[in-house]
Image (cartoon, grey):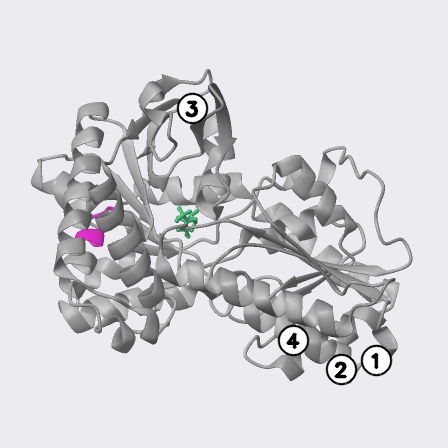
Amino acid sequence: MSVIMVTSRGPYSYEKKNNRIIKQENVGGVATGLKKIIERDRGTWICWGDGNADHLYQDENNGLYRIKRILLNPREKKGFYDDYSNSTLWPLFHYFREKIEHDSIAYGYYRHVNRKFAEVIKDTASSEDVIWVHDYQLSLVPKYLRDMGVKNKLLFTWHIPWVSSEFYTILPEREDIVKSISMCNSITFHTQKYRTNFRHSYERVVGYDKELERRTFTFPLGIDYQSFSHEQIESGKRPFEDKKIIFSIDRLDYTKGLVERVNAIEMFIKKYPEFKEKFVYLMMVTPSRIGVEEYEKLKEKLEMNVGRINGLYGNLNWVPIVYMYRKINSDILKTYYSWGDIALITPMKDGLNLVSMEYVAVSKKGVLILSEFAGISEYLRGAIKTNPNSDDDVSEKIAMAMRMPDSEILRRLRSMKDFLRKHDDRWWANRILGTLVKN
Ligand code: F6P
């Protein structure tokens, strides 16, 4: 038996720049999370080939596992990815009512691309392989596989929040999606709430199904804890020696609460003048979903606010927000994690949030301020919880972190590290694959 991983975004892609082909790691949580699992357990990864040189590597064996890439033409990409996945499903499943767009042409492309994935999976899988499909971009793959007569064991992991059944019914395609996912042998979510919401949504749209209860599970995705905590991290020369570093890294996305966060930093400066020049907020933002209008607008708004705050409060010795917008390699990221005295992770809504887990694993003496609306906040008891909708609350929590005595920082960090050590990526994959014994 081997596992066929199926995701929209692959682990890495190939880009042609100045006549050279460069292998580029992908930044998203799902790709990062699954990479280590498949490297250990081998198998095949089926994904979308998004890089401009991916067509040269459509069926690749990289020495550790096989990757099959599905190529999309610009219209397929727009309809499937920009429009239906990221302008309909993404805002819907993060409760951004006003950002949901809908058009049936986009849904047509989404169906078409999901069917394309199913065709490649069918051609690749041998009868005993487990097919493990991930996330909202591929929700119709199970239906197409079953329609094509594929009888393999099917796993589905939903990585983003599942909204309340009432909110879910906004979606015109509500029936197709829950019915398709329910065709899998096991379906997993990151929190109990998302799992319950899914079952209620199914019940509301299709009807009660006792079976479904037995086939849905909650397992939060873990990280490769050992590699983050033990690796020799090249810490370089830490900048801003006389200041505390507040750190964050996010994809540029409105769900991450970026504009709200810089506004909370402004509130912190105003409300707690004693901390002026005593901190620097190192804000890393990585490009994402370029071409989707909401994301372009967000970039402008964020950068205007960062500029405004730095202009208003900065001086010759101090720039409150050091903002960087670029892709970042994983070694540099680990160095940045190690510099952060405080990690400020305040999404408005987030399926889980791997960044906060990685920070905790790397950090030797850091404080995590975490939004109560990130899935992982249900598990990390040692984090300082905050409501990102309130500048007051976030700024208060920053002041609390700045003043926290070392003994308390270490006590909180230990409890979070213990959780992550016990619930790592290996634990997660084994528990999920284990559900197939009965299902
Ligand atoms: O679960 C959220 C998710 O869509 C993942 O599938 C992915 O890892 C991440 O966000 C990045 O998104 P994209 O693939 O659109 O870059």
Mark 3: which secondary structure?
A: loop
Which one is closest to the eye, mark 1 or mark 3? 1
Which one is closest to the eye, mark 2 or mark 3? 2
Rounded to the nearest angstrom, the CA distance separating label 2 from label 3 is: 53 Å
Query: Up-down: is 215 above or below 313?
Result: above
Which quadrant: the C terminus?
top left
Q: Which residue appears at 36% of the width and 60% of the height?
A: 293
**Mark 2 touches mark 1? (CB < 8 Å):** yes
Task: Look at mark 2 in the image and give the residue it sits on.
Answer: 270
**Most prominent secondary structure in the magenta stretch?**
loop
Q: Is residue 45 left or right of residue 185?
A: right
Between disc 4 and disc 3, whose residue precedes? 3
Residue stretch rendered in magenta on the structure: 180-185
Q: Which mark is residue 264?
A: 4
Q: Which mark is residue 42?
A: 3
Label 1 beta carbon less than 8 Å to ligand 1: no
Q: Choose between 114 and 276: the one closer to the eye.
A: 276
Picture quadrant of residue 204: bottom left
Between disc 4 and disc 1, whose residue precedes? 4
